[in-house]
Image (cartoon, rainbow, N blue to C red):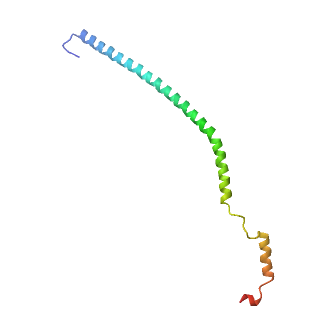
């Protein structure tokens, strides 16, 4: 402060400056509280919106999931090879046994 003022006036000016600063700080705190309240409302609104979207997705997901299961079954059925024309294992064992039992004649082996 000004050093040429008497100590009592210097003290008074410091006190006035402190009071002005206090008013500025108080109004800033009030503004900050309003901003915080506004942000809380925005956060609550976003949570509500998120929950609504989640519920909608959950409701839409069930029929979509059933549809995908049906599509997967169709794809699996289409991708599976047709039944094989080779005889079942039991018959092929019998067939190989008969081959060994009746070997080809020497004429056919040449």
Question: Where's the N terminus, which quadrant?
Answer: top left
Q: Nearer the viewer, residue 67 or 47?
A: 67
Residue shown at 24% from the left, 9% from the top: 9
Residue 30: % across, % down = 42, 19
Residue 19 appears at what percent x and percent y?
33, 14
Rendered position, 35 above or below 23: below
Residue 17 drawn above or below residue 109: above
Residue at (37, 19) in percent of width and height = 25
Left/right of residue 92 with respect to residue 19 in the rendered view: right
Q: Residue placed at 78% from the left, 80% from the top?
A: 99
Label total for image = 0
Q: Quadrant of residue 91?
A: bottom right
Left or right: 97, with 70 as reference point: right
Choose between 45 and 80: the one closer to the eye. 80
Measured from the top left, where is residue 104 in percent x and y? 77, 85
Residue furthest left in the image: 4
33 up-or-down from 97: above or below? above
Where on the picture, by quarter, is residue 97? bottom right
User: Image height check: is 58 above or below 38?
Assistant: below
Determine the residue positioned at 75% across, 90% down: 107
Percent x, y of residue 71: 65, 51
Quarter placement of the C terminus = bottom right
């Amino acid at each position: 402060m000004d050093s040429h003022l008497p100590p009592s006036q210097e003290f008074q000016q410091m006190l006035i400056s402190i009071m002005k600063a206090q008013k500025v700080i108080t109004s800033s705190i009030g503004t900050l509280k309003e901003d915080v309240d506004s942000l809380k409302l925005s956060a609550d609104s976003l949570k509500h919106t998120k929950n609504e979207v989640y519920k909608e997705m959950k409701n839409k997901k069930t029929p979509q999931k059933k549809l995908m299961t049906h599509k997967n079954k169709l794809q699996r059925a289409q991708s599976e090879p047709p039944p094989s024309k080779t005889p079942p294992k039991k018959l092929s064992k019998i067939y190989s046994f008969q081959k060994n039992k009746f070997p080809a004649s020497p004429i056919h082996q040449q």
